[in-house]
Image (cartoon, grey):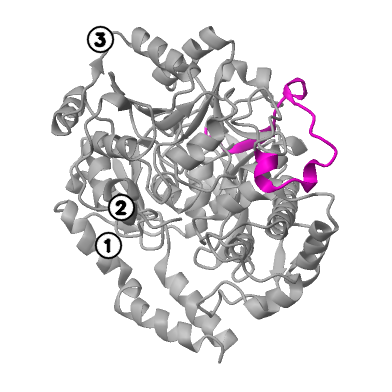
Amino acid sequence: MKQAILGISAYYHDSAAAILVDGEIVAAAHEERFTRKKHDSSFPLHAARYVLEEAGMEYGDLRAVAFYDKPFLTFERLLETYDAFAPRGLVSFWSAIPVWIKEKLFMKRMLRESLAELGKGDVPIFFPEHHLSHAASAFYPSPFEEAAIVTIDGVGEWATTTLGQGRGSEITIHQELRFPHSVGLLYSAFTFYTGFRVNSGEYKLMGLAPYGNSDSSQTADFKSRIIRELVDIRKDGSILLNMDYFDFATGLRMVNEEKWMKLFGIPPRKPETEISQDYMNMALAIQQVTEEIVLRLCRSAKERTGSRYLVLAGGVALNSVANGKVLKSGLFDDIWIQPAAGDAGGAVGAACAVWHISMGGERRPRTGRDGMKGSLLGPEYSGSRIEKTLRRFDAPARHFGNYDELAATIAKILTEGAVVGWFSGRMEYGPRALGSRSILGDARNPEMQKKMNLKIKYREGFRPFAPTVLEEDIQEYFDVDRPSPYMLLVVPIREDMKRKVPADYNDWSLYDRLYFLRSDLPAITHVDYSARIQSVRRDVNPRYWQLIREFKKLTGYGVIVNTSFNVRGEPIVCTPEDAYRCFMRTEMDYLVLGDYLLDKKEQPPLPETKDWRAEFKLD
């Protein structure tokens, strides 16, 4: 009989469920995709039902449930932290502790009550530690038989960073950095101070950093003050935060704003206001500091393990710029990053940890391929479901019985400057759209970034877009010698594609710099001549690969723009209905639903009685 383990991440942010069957990852999904609540933290009931159905399992058939965290250790950390900082934090104490005493302290009971909605059965529940779940999510699905493991995030129970090693079916954690000294929380403090939302706006801070002026004395001064006053960075990458400047340990805010204003000379930026050069320089300064810390941690992991390979997980592993610097350093022959590196990935990691460590399950040889299946682990919808959606909305559509014809048609539409919603196959697991729930455009089009940001995504105009490139063509456009299947590496574009900027370029406004045509692929080239690339293999996502191949036949370029199929504040679309609504609410030109092509000009008005923007809280 097949042995299945259900992995659960829940109650903090980015809840998710995953299922392993005989050690193979069969399905995984974020709860937010079903509930339409961004970063949903509730028990992942919908996601769990989906993964059980995909695996053909009943709840009672499970060998185990794995929860990605040890709640008792987290409670211990809260109590000891409040005791250590007393009398500071009394307000926060009275806010947090009653919830823990009434609910989270009895997590096993809460879980059992929620799991009972999945079916009957006395299934044992395991609680791997948070960073062990991250480490397991990084190592076990990786293509390496042996590797150094680095996990970095805000905080788990006590750990904020761990260094370890994976070998075969075993994981050994060698060192850990403990709360409140956290790289993730340091970065989140600057996310807050520059006017973005903590736990969702960190990627905006990373995207803002290249607009900072690296030659500016202000940038150098910000960096110096960070290192001198806020964080003591040791040679091995461990850090000590000066908690006089931070309130996250016991307060209800990230930082002591009065002290930060005195230190940096600028106030916290108010969300949604204009971004001045001061905050761009601040973003660059903290990005550079973070990269240095990550590099030192990875160097320590190399020295401790002697491994040729590195795997990464934890929220900070989504910092694709830092990942690119680690790869370029040459410390390791190769690196692999869990595509769902944040807390959602803990669902996969917890299940992997229970299977391999607690139950002694053997790890299958990878032969150079990872076990994430392109991270295409979510639900797929049949042609009949799509037809039902079309009938529901009375939506005119053209059906293609031959996919070759559909791919060629869409490729031609892209060359004409149109923006296409692309809904095809299984939904992605992780925060990146990888060619199943994507919005596509022509990377050569100088107007494409502005159009996508302002008229499609309804988000800040400075935000960069990523390219998808045929894996076999990656070196034609980018300065990298290996694939990047999960959009988790930022690398430079090739020198022969760059266009030189004027001497006074750094004095220009943000948007003047942004819209300068700096390369042959302006829609995906960031202001520092970099790009966050996704490479696609024919055998992993054949339909998406073929579309780009058809585009190359027409243009000579095997690369297009790919961004997630959603608007700002909305989770990535899951169902055909989600996709159609998003298509109609934006200025997308065409929509592909499976084998159907929809033209916006032919669609009837979407029947809505209220402003849809009120559904989604801006992130």
Vertical comparison of 118 with 366: above or below: below
Q: Which residue is mark 2?
A: 65
Report the number of discs.
3
Q: Is residue 306 visible?
A: yes
Q: Nearer the viewer, residue 431 or 527?
A: 527
User: Residue drawn 47% across and 44% down?
Assistant: 340
Location of residue 159 (image quadrant) = bottom right
Q: Which residue is mark 1?
A: 111
Distance Cα–Cα, label 3 vs label 1: 46 Å
- The x, y position of residue 37, in whole percent, is 33, 54
Q: Which mark is residue 143?
A: none
Location of residue 511 (image quadrant) = top right
Report crowding for label 3: few under 14, some 14 to 19, many 20 or more residues within 10 A (C-alpha): few
Which range is magenta? Answer: 486-514
Q: Which residue is mark 3?
A: 401
Vertical comparison of 234 with 229: above or below: above
Q: Nearer the viewer, residue 410 or 430?
A: 410
In the shown orientation, is residue 447 left or right of residue 2?
Answer: right
- The x, y position of residue 517, in whole percent, is 68, 29
Vertical comparison of 121 with 597: above or below: below
Q: Earlier in the sequence, mark 2 or mark 3?
A: 2
Q: Earlier in the sequence, mark 3 or mark 1?
A: 1
- The x, y position of residue 539, in whole percent, is 44, 17
Q: Residue 394 magenta-drawn?
A: no
Q: Secondary structure at mark 1?
A: helix
Q: Secondary structure at mark 2?
A: strand
Report crowding for label 2: few under 14, some 14 to 19, many 20 or more residues within 10 A (C-alpha): many
**Nearer the camera: disc 2 or disc 1:** 1
